[in-house]
Image: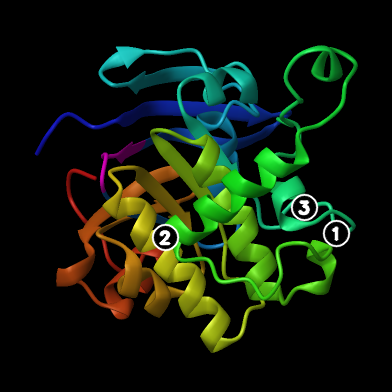
Amino acid sequence: MALPLLDARELVKHYGNVEALRGASFTAHAGEVVALVGDNGAGKSTLVKCLSGVARPDSGTILFDGAPVALDSPVSARELGIETVYQDLAVAPDLDPAANLFLGRELRRPGLLGRLGVLDKREMRRRAVASFHELGVTLPDVDVPIGALSGGQRQSVAVARSVVWASRLVFMDEPTAALGVVQRERVLDVIRRVRDQGMAVVLISHNMPEVLAVADRVEVLRLGRRVARFDAAATTVEELVGAMTGALTQEDA
């Protein structure tokens, strides 16, 4: 297999007396969906924070494209082409989908108007519509506040926002939580499209059937360490649960 795009080795992270990561390792390759699973308290959230620049590990090594990197802030992660879709979405409900897509990265009008801070809403809308179309995101109206859309549509916009700005890797934290069956499948389809564009997608989920439906590989955390790795096509929900609970062990994780 090709060199991993992201390769975290033996990460350790303490919060006071609590050791959230105890030598955790993780790999993600370009053009794949790799699921990160584990029971509550396994260290998934802490690991993602360390790999997205939100938190810094106390020790360990993170390689990106084979070179050591220091992800000391979300900005440094974004400079490498890494974006994150958080479970709480972090969307602005009073703004329309295009404005949400460019939130914090607004385009300004050319010339004097731009220097005066006037936004180029027409260009942002044009680019947003093109991006939604490319990702297969279907919205009834791109000019209504995002708060008026369904849960699945809001989630799709949040996913699209990260994908548009990412160039290499996207972390997706429980992207289908609290969605209905149809809405969930739409979000999973967006994830597949992102992978097919050559990006690495890291899916954090408690939904094991969903993991096996969309992931290419699965890495399992337990008590702050990676304890197993699986080819999704060759494993079962029972094996994943066994690795998460410690009922099943796997060598050379």
For disc 3, the marked residue is 91
Q: Are marks 3 and 1 in contact (CB under 8 Å)?
A: yes
Of 12 and 184, the residue lying toward us: 184
What residue is disc 1 on? 93
Q: Is residue 250 in view?
A: yes
Give the answer, above or below, for where 81 lies relative to 153: above
Amino acid under disc 1: Pro
The verdict on residue 28 being magenta is: yes
Q: Which mark is residue 191?
A: 2
Residue 103: which numbered mark, if any? none
Secondary structure under badge 2? helix
Residue drawn at point x = 46 percent, y = 28 percent: 81
Q: Position of residue 222 (x, y in %)?
A: 44, 53
- In the image, the segment drawn in magenta is 26-31
Farthest residue, direction left: 1
Residue 110: x and y, percent?
Answer: 72, 19
